[in-house]
């Protein structure tokens, strides 16, 4: 059971602060709800008896923030070439409510966007995943949203640059790149 003032994460919505715990009569059924204040002055009601079932959890502590940043700095990106499978896999990661999985989605889709762009659906998914990630980091680090966004973007940009450098094959001679030439001997043998 959470209390008023607790910082919690509601999967698919992000992190917020419990503003109140109220009993509401909705459609003739009385239930107790967490009234969650989300970023952007949005309020969400979560039934207290279903909170654990839907994956509501406490936000990460400061020590785990660095682990999230490590996920964002990974250079290796494994994604399915099949758009539908990739979309479903990423949606499952976001629905899990696990911040490390959400960070992986943000990094992977950010890389894909930088490489060759994203479909409209994946752009929206990236935007939602990033909002969910940033909302939790803001509360965990007690920092303004724009600062956290800057840190996240910098971590992704620096890891993408390293990823790009690793994926470029060095070419010893630019001509050989286009016209393969194999040396069979020295000029003395000709």
Image (spheres, rainbow, N blue to C red):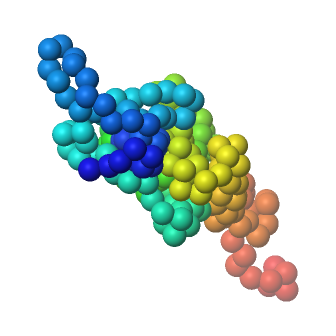
Observer-nearest of 26 and 125: 26
Q: Quadrant of the C terminus?
A: bottom right
Q: Quadrant of residue 158?
A: bottom right
Observer-nearest of 17 and 59: 17
At x 22%, y 17%, the residue is: 26
Coordinates of residue 84 in the picture (x, y in percent): 35, 34
At x 44%, y 28%, the residue is: 43
- Is residue 186 something one can see in this rendering? yes
Left or right: where 49 falls relative to 84: left
Coordinates of residue 68 in the picture (x, y in percent): 51, 61
At x 21%, y 19%, the residue is: 25
Observer-nearest of 163 and 101: 101
**Is 128 drawn above or below residue 7 in the view shown?**
above
**Is 102 drawn above or below residue 158 in the view shown?**
above
Coordinates of residue 80 in the picture (x, y in percent): 39, 47
Q: Quadrant of residue 39?
A: top right
């Amino acid at each position: 059971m959470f209390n008023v003032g607790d910082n919690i994460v509601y999967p698919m919505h992000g992190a917020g602060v419990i503003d109140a715990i109220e009993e509401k009569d909705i459609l003739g059924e009385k239930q107790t709800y967490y009234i969650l204040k989300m970023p952007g002055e949005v309020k969400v009601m979560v039934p207290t008896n279903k909170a654990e079932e839907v994956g509501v959890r406490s936000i990460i502590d400061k020590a785990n923030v660095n682990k999230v940043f490590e996920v964002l700095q990974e250079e290796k990106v494994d994604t399915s070439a099949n758009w539908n499978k990739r979309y479903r896999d990423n949606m499952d990661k976001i629905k899990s409510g696990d911040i490390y999985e959400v960070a992986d989605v943000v990094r992977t889709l950010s890389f894909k966007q930088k490489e060759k762009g994203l479909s409209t659906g994946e752009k929206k998914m990236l935007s939602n995943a990033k909002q969910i990630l940033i909302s939790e980091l803001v509360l965990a680090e007690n920092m303004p949203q724009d600062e956290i966004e800057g840190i996240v973007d910098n971590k992704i940009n620096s890891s993408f640059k390293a990823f790009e450098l690793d994926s470029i094959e060095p070419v010893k001679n630019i001509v050989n790149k286009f016209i393969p030439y194999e040396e069979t001997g020295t000029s003395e043998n000709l």
